[in-house]
Amino acid sequence: MAELTNTMGQEVNVKSDREGKYLTFSMAAEEYGIGILKVKEIIGMMAITMIPQTPPYVKGVINLRGKIIPVVALRLKFGMEEIDYTDRTCIIVVEVKTSTGHVMMGLVVDAVSEVLNIRNAEIEDTPVFGTSLNTDFILGMAKAGNGVKILLDIDKVISAREMEIVQQAA
C-alpha cells in the first residue's frame, strides 16, 4: 500500500499492490482471480479422502506426490450450490499464509479460465454491502471486457479459525 497526500493535505492509503498476473477461474457463471504467485499448480480432479467431522466445504485431503494437502470446495465455502464434477472441474493448489507459516491447500473450482495481466487502472475497490457482510477476502473488482472478475485475497478466504480446522484435517 502506498501513501499519497490528497488536496486537503491528508495522507491517504492507496492500494497499489493489486496489479499483476491473476489465474482466473469460474464458479456458477462468475469469474474469479487469484494472484498467480499464490498458485503452485493446477491438477485434474483426483480421489479425495474425506475427513470426518469437518465443515461441508472441507472436502478432505489428497496425496500429492507424497504430501498430504487439505482440499476446500470454494463453491460450498462461498455458499453456492454443490454441483457434480465435470471434465473441467479441477483443483488449484495454492500456498496460503497463516499465523504459523505457509500452508499448501487445494481449491476445487468449476473450471480454470486463463492467466490475465491486470493493471491497477482496471481494478476498483470492493463495493460496500453494509457491516453485516464480510468482504475482507476480496482484493477488488477487475473490469475485463464487459464483465467483472472478483479478485480474491486467498490468504483471507478462509479465516484463521477455519484454517485451524483445515490444517487439522491434514
Image: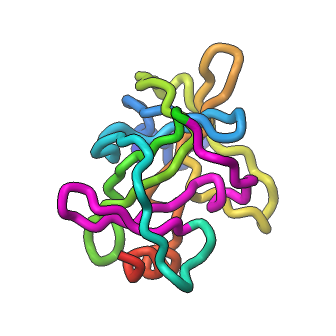
| Identity of the residue drawn at 28% across and 62% down | 63
Does 58 sit above or below residue 53?
Answer: above
Does 164 sit above or below residue 60?
Answer: below
Q: How many marks?
A: 0
Is 66 situated left or right of 25 in this image?
left
Q: Is residue 7 among the parts visible in the rendering?
A: no
Does 77 sit above or below residue 91?
Answer: below
Q: Residue furthest bottom?
A: 53
Residue 158 position within the rendered picture, expressed as x and y whole percent measured from the top left? 52, 66
Q: Residue furthest top?
A: 145
| Identity of the residue drawn at 26% across and 56% down | 64
Q: Residue furthest front?
A: 47
The question of residue 25 being in magenta is answered with: no
Q: Nearer the viewer, residue 14 or 46?
A: 46
Residue 138 position within the rendered picture, expressed as x and y whole percent measured from the top left? 58, 49
Is 37 situated left or right of 139 in this image?
left
| Identity of the residue drawn at 51% across and 37% down | 33
| Identity of the residue drawn at 52% across and 34% down | 87
Q: Nearer the viewer, residue 79 or 124?
A: 79
Is 93 situated left or right of 45 in this image?
left
Q: Quadrant of residue 99?
A: bottom left
Q: Nearer the viewer, residue 123 or 62?
A: 62
Region in magenta: 58-86
Residue 95 position within the rendered picture, expressed as x and y whole percent measured from the top left? 32, 56
The question of residue 68 being in magenta is answered with: yes
Residue 37 position within the rendered picture, expressed as x and y whole percent measured from the top left? 30, 41
Does 159 sit above or below residue 13?
Answer: below
Q: Is residue 31 among the parts visible in the rendering?
A: yes
Q: Residue furthest left?
A: 66
